[in-house]
Amino acid sequence: MSKPTLRITESGHVQDQFYHAQASSRAIGLLMHRSLERRRSKHSSVDDRFTDAEIAFAGNLIKQGSFWRTWRKRYFILRNDRPSLCYYSSSKELTKLGEMTLDAHTMVEMENSCHFTIKTNARKLVLNATEGGIEYMQQWIDALNLAIASCRSSVPFAFKNATPISDHDNTRGRRSNTGEIITDEAIAIHVAQVVTGQENIQEMTVDYRASMPNFTPQFLAQLSTKSRDEETGLRRTHSLNDMATIQSHTARSSEDDGNEMTKPVPSMVACSWTDRNRDPSNAVESEAESHYGFGLNCQSLSLVHIRPPKAFHFCVSFGSMEKVPHGVQLFVVLSTLNWEQTNAIQQSQRPLKKEHMTEIARTEVECTNHLRLCGDQYVRDFQALIALPVFLVDSNVVLQFDVYIAANEVTELLKYHKLLGYFTIASTDLVADSEDGTPLRMDLRRDLSDGKLTSDILGNQNFLVLEQVATQPIYEMDQGYTFATHEYLVDSAMHSSLQVPRASSIDELLAPLEDELSIDKPLSIRATSEVLVTEEMSASYFSLTVVMAFVQMLLRRNALRMTETHQLIDTIKERDIKRSTMTSPHGGEPFEFEGLLAAKDRLNYYEGLEEVYAQMERRYAALVAMVREGAEHGVTSCLKRSTMKKDPSVEFMPTNLVCHLLRAQLPNEAREQFAWSVITHGCAAAHVQGFKEGGLRRMLVQPPGSDEVARKLEYRQDVANCQLLSIVTTAFMTYLQLAADDLHDLAVAQLNMISRVGFLVNIESLLSTAGGERAMLEDMSEGVKWINESVSFSILSTEGDRIRCSRIFIENRVGVVVHVTIPIKMLAKLPLSFQQQPRIKMFAVLFTQGINEMQLVANHVGDTSIQEEINAESMVVLSQYIENYMEIAARERDDAIYLPLADIHSNHAILIATIESQKKNLKNINVLIDSSHLCRQLGAARTTCCKSGKDRTAMSVTLEFTRLLVENLGVKQGMCLCQAMRERGVRRTNVLVNTGKTMYAFNSLQLKCLPSCYKPPASTANANVAS
């Protein structure tokens, strides 16, 4: 089977890896009672989509009609992700005409030459394979027999079952934090005491996102493993829904008093996890909690408090006992149960205040039709993992899983969605039951309070399957502070179920299947068969240290200029003194009065500038000291918020400079890992100086003005260059750290090439060519020229454990050398050729394409020439770099065998053609995609920016990461994963730390104008967000 691909058209439409099947006319089907939609047993929706990896066998067959007995050519597809044989009008149109569900009683019989039949209890298909011959027919029969054999195989230990606690007569006791055995009666008494003792519980607002506060107490209850039910092969865990001895109340989401979606829950919850944290043993966490809040409702936007705590991670799947669970958009919410109770309410006759839930995490809105066999049931998998913080694993904490039907795509508020079912469980039981990795089944309870029953949608017997997943520890960047993470579990074509082999006999054909379905090996455990994807985001310390070193360089430059000016003034005065002497040979020369005034004016300017630079140095030094002491990693130190673009106190700092890291761990025995990074940031431009007169690119081509204009121009250059230098330094050192830890031969070969050719940084810009963003683009493009002409790096070793920018100095009045110190252990991992290289030359290319509504205006009535000029200039630099790269690779044959030289050559030609064929009235998205793909093959660092580096940038980086996963690891659900990352991933946290809100800053018009591949989920966009 071919590997899945993810292609983007010129205008930004996704040509994803799916085949899209369409429904045929229902008129004849309804008349003949054969409508596909009426069949309850069908395993795919009418409008289905699937990939090559989900096709076991496919081809044309001639089918005999079941009514008229006429023969017609149809295109048949046998699925390997579900036991179904579907037939379509043709391989191109994929108009779905019918489906046969295979089961253990299905029979395949070969009749006369090239004819065979498929029989089930419900229907019979008569097929003719004349076009392919006997061998082609035998291939079909073998593939069908293999699919039928998989239906006959049984796996008794597919998963454990989570059932109500009241179903057990002899329930084992649970251990408290002190190790004491607690029975159910003791729990009920203990809970009643705690509930009545709670008088003033602070109300907690609903956290509707999956980010968590940094409260990690050092306790975790001793968990004992539950025994397996030998008769059924299922392990039961405790649920709290049906405890008859405990009074039930009505729990609602606290988002709205008028929420109609209510459900019964017990009053067993002793206290919320917030109240539990007030235990004296957790005084530090309690103080932090009361001061900062929690999660995305955190009152402090300091990165220390945004960083998620240690957690258990669970993958979630949804299934139905009655209907095949497809065609409905679903999501799952994990919450803790809390409520308020006061003495005043107890003494009065009024009812208790409503209980409410505090949301901990949720999955993405799962909208695919992809099904997976789990035991003997089909389930739909959610890709985003749910994180349960370790400090919530306590005997007093009760969790609730709610499954919602996404009824309103433009909002995340739960009151606008349909509750399908829920399950309540103690946090300790959830962890204990799932700690061995066996899938845990939870039968959902229905919401009977709502008049709209869900039985017509997915039936009444729905369930969740949870698996505890061992995730990777955080990859700590030596040059940054990691403040956001999120994990996903995705299906890959390279690690999917067995494909159909060609065998000489049916026994030989079924042998690998029997090994795969051995009862000694759990079936369909996602954690051992799917790719674990981890997103991480860190704020770079270089946004401070490089800036401080750059300001110190400006101070030295300014001091040198002051010295030269003093010398000039002394020279002029000395000449005037000599001129005043009667016998002086200079007596006839005119006085240099104007030159003296100009020199004194420059001196006054330099003296004022020295005070400005000295004040900046003190400010940045104080912020660096705070970071080094670990006192503050917030927006006032190593991360400049996007709302602070025009703040003069942090003018030289790059806006929203973060490293977005994506890691993928394969489910093979070696647990092979891959890592990709993109540095994201706001545009490197002088926002404080304004853009009324344009940017540097426009100003530098204008006729020379006064000294004041020249000084403003130089200051603007310093600001833009400093910001861009911080970005390039972050990109370079991030690349070095990842390459040092990369065990693949390609990484070593690319490092050897960098030491000889220089290091390339590819900057992707999403800025439009209209209004202020055009001027920003003009600033940044001149900064890129300065990088290419002047900047090189010198790598030094240090005994410390952090990467530091120690000094920046000017060489020959033009060149700028950046001294960076790295730990000795990291330097030792780099190739010897790299260690011996005293200087690494920097090269930067900027490829730009606007994607917002202003670019649409510029394409039709404005000017896009600057975009075309910048791309053409960058193409020249890139072509020269590739030429040098190829020349050196031809000499270094040991490294060349690992380098994709043929792909580089072909992709270079593709990019040239794309640049030369840019159309003015279109958003040529492939300029960005092709350039980033080519630069990655060259071993370049990648950065992406828009105005503030959070909204359009988020759309671009998630798309790029998705394409990397699809093309390198064969991930099946490409665009679904892309939307999941946009909805639940670290980019939402980045928006929070910049604006204090979690929504992307897109209004309805902007959403319509964005290319489809850059559109976020509608529920994550809001116009009322500062950018």
Image: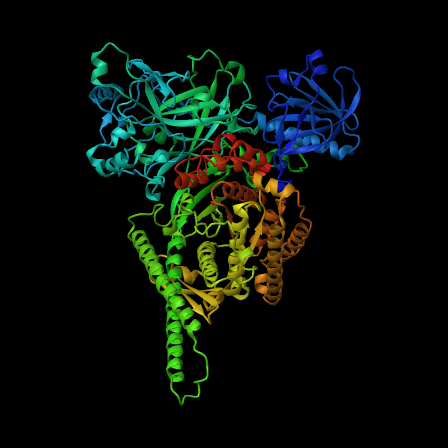
For the N terminus, which image quadrant?
top right
Compare residues 468 and 405 and report the one nearer the observer. Answer: 405
Residue 843 appears at what percent x and percent y? Answer: 53, 60
Quarter placement of the C terminus = top left
The image shows residue 448 at horizontal and vertical percentages of: 43, 12
Q: For residue 117, what is the image quadrant?
A: top right
Q: Residue at x 66, y 50 (%)?
A: 914
Picture coordinates of residue 896, whole percent (x, y): 59, 61
Residue 58 in sight from this viewpoint: yes
Question: Does residue 488 appear left or right of residue 493 in this picture?
Answer: left
Count every numbered label the image shows and give the total: 0
Front-lying residue, 343 or 471? 343
Q: Quadrant of residue 504?
A: top right
Residue 357, relative to residue 976: is it above or below?
Answer: above
Is 908 situated left or right of 426 in this image? right
Q: Indicate left or right for 573 with 848 as reference.
A: left
